[in-house]
Amino acid sequence: MLLAPILLVLLSCQPRPATPKTETAKLTQLPELLPRSPLIGTPEEQAYIINTYNSLAEKLQADPYHLDAKLKMAQLLMLEARATGEHGHYYPAALKMTGSVLAQNPPRDEEFQALLLQTSVYLSLHQFERALQSGEKALALNPHNALIYGALVDAHVELGQYAQAVEYADKMVAIRPDLRSYARVSYLREIHGDVPGAIEAMKLAVSAGMPGYEDAAWCRYTLGKLYERYGQHELAGHEFRLCLDERPNYPFALAALADLHQLKGEYQEAEKLLDQACAIIPEVGFYEQKAALYQKMGKDEQTAALSQEILAMLADDEANGHKMDMEYARVYRDLLNDLPKALEHALAEYRSRPDNAEVNELLASIYFKMDELEAAEKHIEKALATESKDPELLCLSGLILIKAGNEAQGRQQLEASMRQNKYQQHAFAAAAQTALKRF
């Protein structure tokens, strides 16, 4: 899971001396700006996006080699990808734009900006090795920019290189203590088991944001998810509702509130909120939530139909350069109960980033369900290496230990899990409650 969006702000690029003009650098076709749902952002925000796009398009039509316009267009496309969920359209277009800049052999500053943007896109596409390579090139050009350290924090976390991520997060905070750096500190603290510290840092991120902006809404939503993950549901709901007050119709907050209603058995209200979220942006995670809700409601036909729709969405993302093996694995594990296919995709992800805790937790869960306990123990040990206190992770660990015959230690893990969150509703929660009742 990416700790937070890169959250780039529009850069101010001054015109530079003419650079070599090659055919690969020339833009022959501008990316289309797709119509936004009227529910996304404010009318003023939408007008700003349209006006900015038209202004940049005019510059690029007049001069297909305009470096400043290309960089700002790439940023605009990335912002729209996040706001609208149209990843398959905007991320490839942003990569094309940054590639066009780099093909011009640009001056140092513009090369750095293009590499920084390229790194952000690769992270969004889950191409983490490429993100790391691009980010390291950018760092060599400018080791004093906070944003590049943030991008490299993300890349190292996703590759399971947590010590390097902590080092870069410290450098980012030292350069610029703001919303972006606090969000990354929060995630790293949570990974290493410091839940109060993670909440404290995310509160700082929220305070540093401008209410109503998408990045500020994301941070408040993330704070709410922290509260939810550790059983503080009233605080979570408060943050999600504040999020919607500050940025009406923010789809991630709507989907998060749906989760809270589902936990209370209020399935119709949860379904209504998920329908609203899905109508705003085509975020595959919302559809997965909805399929899981149908599954819980016993709507088998709707679950099966929506699961196939989700697979089609994942295939479309994959066709546009987005690595989706983790998502495929979860769909096959949770919705389709096809464990061999789930394992196939989880192993594909593991081969590219074997040290990532989340990948190892996924593999451990699949092996556990397949009764391959030796493999499950191997991967859960790697998943626990950072001493995370994530309740679902501890729960899975306890169940694996009990199934492997280590009941005393398994019980300790389950009890620790329930201390963190006694309201768990994930796939293994019922089995954990049953196991605890036996002791």
Image (spheres, helix red, strand yellow):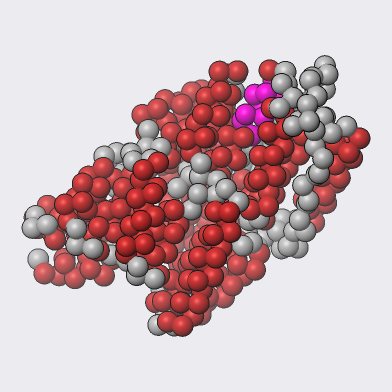
Q: Is residue 40 above or below residue 136?
A: below
Between 33 and 127, the residue placed more toward the observer is 127
The count of marks equals 0
**Residue 314 belongs to the span the image colors magenta:** no
- Residue 302 in view (yes/no): yes
Q: What residue sits 24% from the left and 49% below the top?
A: 380
**Residue 115 belongs to the span the image colors magenta:** yes
Between 183 and 152, the residue placed more toward the observer is 152
Q: Is residue 19 above or below residue 36?
A: above
Q: Is residue 346 above or below residue 307?
A: above
> Which region is colored magenta?
109-117
Q: What residue sits 41% from the left and 76% below the top?
A: 295
Q: Where is residue 34 shown, x and y percent of the image? A: 76, 56
Outermost residue to the right: 62
Q: Where is residue 386 shown, x and y percent of the image? A: 29, 39
Q: What residue sits 54% from the left and 53% below the top?
A: 318
Instruction: Classify residue 254 by image quadrant.
Output: bottom right
Instruction: Classify residue 58 by image quadrant.
Output: top right
Dominant SS in magenta: helix
Relative horizontal placement of residue 285, taking residue 348 as reference (left or right) = right
Q: Where is residue 217 shown, x and y percent of the image? A: 60, 50
